[in-house]
Amino acid sequence: MSTDSSDQVLEYPFRAPNAVEPPEEWAKLRKGCPVAHVRLPSGDKAVLVTRYDDVRHVLSDPRFTRNLSQEGAARITANEGGSAFESEAAAEISAGEQHEKWRRFISRWFTVKRISAMQQSIEAMANQLIDEMVAKGPPADLVSELAFPLPVWVIAEILGISVDERDKLATWSNAMLTLTQFTQAEVDKAQAEFTEYLMGHIAKKRAQPGDDLLSDLIRAADQGEQISEKVLMLTAQGVLVAGHETTSNMIAKMVAMLLSDRKRWERLLAEPSLVRTAVEEALRFDANAGFGLPRFITEDIELSGTKVPRGTTIICNMASANRDEKAFERADDMVLNRAPNPHLAFGAGGHSCVGQALARTELQTVLSVLLRRLPSLDLAVASQDLPRREGLLVGGIERLLVRW
């Protein structure tokens, strides 16, 4: 590979100074080595891109696949079986040419209109969780009391899973987003239990369909669409894993960002109409977004003047791209009324996040309810002391102790 930079191989992912600040490597790489050689947790080598234009280019190019089971693709983790990227690849393989049709079908379920209709239900869930948290009194861990359960409850409703079964889902979701936190045996056990549960749940939905995503998919399958039981199961699994972990982490990180500089919170109390743009800015400003999105490139390309040969695994670091000074004015400031805000938190192109309308609605709803219910909310520990979630593919905060 021809490159102006040194051939030094960096260990990836990088370590950030704390839960709300970015690793210093991002700015250095954007400036001096935008196409960097890295070693992944598996020990395999890949290329990391950190600039906005490069990340957007790779993610938007339909030639590059998310399927990391191809020969020559880097493994992300040492225990790859059952991890999120492996599962995503399985969905792509099992659906084959049906993948785009499947994606369009799923997208119909996650329209802004449909998600807006769920907004009241999401608000009621947020209020119930806050009621329970307030009853226990401060200090409280906002992660376990609100940020972690809420998205699980929302996904359970979308999949037609009953209230008393929804807490099982969170455990399985965690295990399938492992980098190093769980052993391969634990990942396999969670995968097997989850698969068994979902197959039973699908059978129940087939017998008694309702107004939920799985029932709709089953109806489509019964009307001649080629949707196998495996694709149904992988869809449910994908919706849970993608829709739970990332959103629960983002709720906690958003609140931490807003409270780490109290003026931000006070501005939203004074101008609650800024909730929508504040959520978008929190998504852009997130310095603890986790691993990034891998792509396996099947043709030679050039990025920032560097030739990248086909057969390379590229890691797209959207969080670094979102801090690119060439793409965003005052990129290192959290500007609550920033508009436009073309951040890449949900990816770009044909594989951008199907559930982004849902994530936005959950984040806006939770923030609005917290501002209204707990205007005096504050961190109970210094922001630099917030414990991070370790060993998972998505970055987050382990505990967010708050008082009010």
Image (cartoon, rainbow, N blue to C red):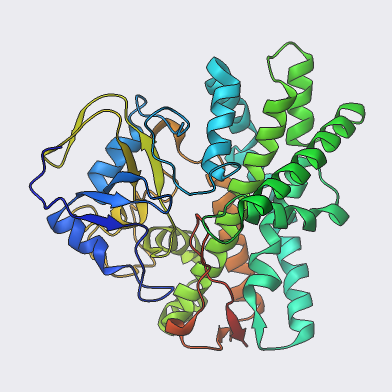
Where does residue 137 sit, x and y in percent of width and height? 74, 88
Kindly identify the residue that appears in the image at 30 percent across and 41 percent down: 56
The quadrant in which residue 21 appears is: bottom left
Q: Say which of 17 and 254 sits in front.
A: 17
For residue 348, say whether it is visible. no
The quadrant in which residue 128 appears is: bottom right
Instruction: Name the quadrant of the N terminus.
Output: top left
* Residue 212 higher or lower than 44, as above or below: above
* Residue 262 higher or lower than 273, as above or below: below
Q: From the viewer's perspective, is 86 left or right of 19? A: right
For residue 376, say whether it is visible. yes
* Residue 166 higher or lower than 366, as above or below: above
The quadrant in which residue 3 appears is: top left
Q: From the viewer's perspective, is 336 left or right of 323? A: right
Where does residue 396 sit, x and y in percent of width and height? 51, 65
Q: Residue furthest right?
A: 207
Instruction: Name the quadrant of the C terminus.
Output: bottom right
Where does residue 209 sit, x and y in percent of width and height? 86, 30
Kindly identify the residue that appears in the image at 76 percent across and 62 percent down: 124
